[in-house]
Structure formats: structure tokens, C-alpha cells
Amino acid sequence: MLGSVRYALARSSTLKQVRLQLTITGASFASIAATLHTFGRFYAAQKSCLSSLVFVETKGSGFDEGALNAITAARKISGPVVAVVAGSEADAVAKAIAKIEGVSKVVVAKDAAYDHALPETTATLLKALQEKEGATHIFAPHTAAGKNVMPRLAALLDSQQISDVISVESEDTFMRPVYAGNAIATVQSSDPIRVITVRTTAFPAATASASASAAEEAAPAVDAQALSKWIKEDMAKSDRPDLATAKRVVSGGRAVKSAEGFQIIYDLADKLGAGVGASRAAVDAGYCDNSLQVGQTGRIVAPELYIGIGISGAIQHLAGMKDSKVIVAINKDADAPIFQIADYGLVGDLFTIVPELIEKL
């Protein structure tokens, strides 16, 4: 029996989005097929209107490498990926970012006002670029700078930020950990502009390509008044690999008993060429600097090898390292929770096991 097929098209010129609403009543197969073909064309048009901005935090003439992971996440959304580089030495950084595979354009804001990624100035710049580029998604790594800038940007855009994303399922659906990583939430956003921070350990870093050569474009002038002032930064200098990017990490816990006892962690790390981490208990006890803390309220790491020494494995600590490729636990308590996720476990006194391990390496 023949029927009727009706469809209504709604278009938002500002966001270049297309929405198709179908009402099918007793339609023939031919009518349904024709209508679905029309829907497919409009859906393809909607997909083609997607585009992403990626915030790249500059650090002098270098940049935070978490931006490379954010670029990988942005590439999972159909459409061009535009990198935003801002700071007094943005030109040098832009040339490096232009060679990253998947980046279609680099917008350069060369201005000392954007140094140190102060949230007031940076968020205002990103808002202006979103309006200029018509971006539907704005990505940043879930770093201190990303967590500082993106909430302010979301407020300026009247959008709800989606934090610490570990998977991009589609242009409006994302996955993120909750309850210290014990559950994974699937979040579907109805906001026309999605403001997203990504967990850098969940996405591989985008790489440079000899054939990649993204166009560079100057950012428009933005009237952004800084409400805060950069004073200084105290950095702990070390010859060891940076904790966030180290391929091997050795962490110590409360069981090392003292700052002097923590030296055994440094000794093993130096033998392995590894970065050094710590549990919150060790940091709170003053055994080491708080920049070494691994966990929910510290650094999130996912090295090829993670060795936890004298760490019981509280939920908050496991949330920061359980994605490591190989986990080795050393603890005198055979029932310590860390053994439940460890690939290899040694039960015994760390002050006996670790020196022997160092001697054999």
C-alpha cells in the first residue's frame, strides 16, 4: 500500500548544523529508500561541517607534548583540525606543529600576553577563534593549563565542559572515568560547541610527517585584559626522565619509612633510566617532593614499565597508574590491593629485595 513520506529540515546558519526529522506513514519501500537517501545526504553535510580547535600550550620555544595526544583525539572527529599556538615565541612552535600529521592549519597569536597560558587571556582568544573558524569542538590536554583555561572558555561559550576524556565515540559522545577510575561514564553532549580536555595517556601522540605542511595564519587581534599576573615558577630540575613521559617509572610508598629510605627508589630508577614517582602517603609524610605524586590527585602515568615499591595500592593511586603496560609490585603484605592489578609481584622486605635487584641490574 502506498503512503506518504514527509520530512522537515532545520538549519542553523551560525553553527552550520543540519537536522532532519522524518515522519513515515505507510510508505512504500521505494519512498522509504528515497527518503533515507535524502537523510544520508543531509547527514553527510552535517558531518562535513564539523571542525576542531586544539589548544597548544607553549613553553618558551617549545610546547607541552600533551597537545600531540589532544590532536590525535581531535582527529577522531570528522573535519579539519586547527591548532592554536599563542605566546611570545609562538612562531617557532607553529613551525613544529605545522609538521604534525593531521593538522590542517596553525593559527599563530604571537603576543607575550599569552605566555604562561593565563586563563583570562587564553580563553578569550580561543572564544574569538571559535567564532571565526566556526569550530564545533575545542580540545586541550587534561593538564594544569588545560584544566585552568577550558572551564573559563566553556563558561564564555555557555557550554558544559567534558573533562578527562579517554575515548571519542562520535562527535557528541565521549567516555571518561569517574569514581577514581572504578567506573567509565559514557557522556552524550547536546551542546552545539563541545569543550573537551583529554587524558593524554589514553591517546597516542600525533607524529610529525615529512609530507605534512599545514598552513600558518595570524590570529585576529583580541582585546583580552588579564585579571591575574604571572609571578614566577619554581621548577624542580632533574636529570631523570620527566614523570609524565617516562617509559619506565619507579614509585615509592609509605613503607620506605623516611626521606633517607626513599633514596633506594632513586637508586633503582637511575639503574633503569626511569622516572621517579610516589604515593600520596609518601608525599604527605615528606619523603619526597609533591611533584612526584602519582594518582587521582597527582600525575596520571601509563609507562611501559611501572614498579611500585612499598605501595599498598589505594584506589586513588591505582587511578593514576593502572593503564601502565607492565606493572611490578614489591610489598611485604601479600594481600595488598596493588597485587590485584600487578603483572608481577614480589612479596618481601623492600630493603632486602631492592638492593639485590639493583646489584643484579
Image: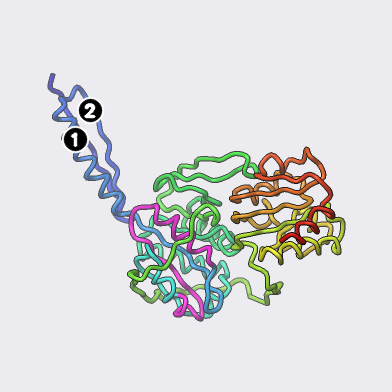
On residue 24, the disc is: 2
Name which residue type carries label 2.
Answer: Ile
Location of residue 131 in the rendering, given as x and y in whole percent from the top left corner: 38, 63
Magenta segment boundaries in residue numbering: 65-93
- In front of the other: 41 or 66: 66
Give the CA distance from mark 2 to mark 1: 9 Å
Of the image marks 2 and 1, the number of the one nearer the N terminus: 2
Q: Residues within 10 Å of mark 1 (few under 14, many from 20)?
A: some
Question: Among all residues in the image, which is located at the extreme top?
Answer: 1
On residue 35, the disc is: 1
Quadrant position of the N terminus in the picture = top left
Q: In the rendered view, would you say 210 is above or below 251?
A: below
Q: Is residue 252 left or right of residue 298?
A: right
Q: In the rendered view, would you say 237 is above or below 19?
A: below
Name which residue type carries label 1.
Answer: Thr
> Residue drawn 49% across and 54% down?
203
- In front of the other: 43 or 190: 43
Q: How is the image coloured?
A: rainbow
Location of residue 136 in the rendering, given as x and y in whole percent from the top left corner: 39, 55
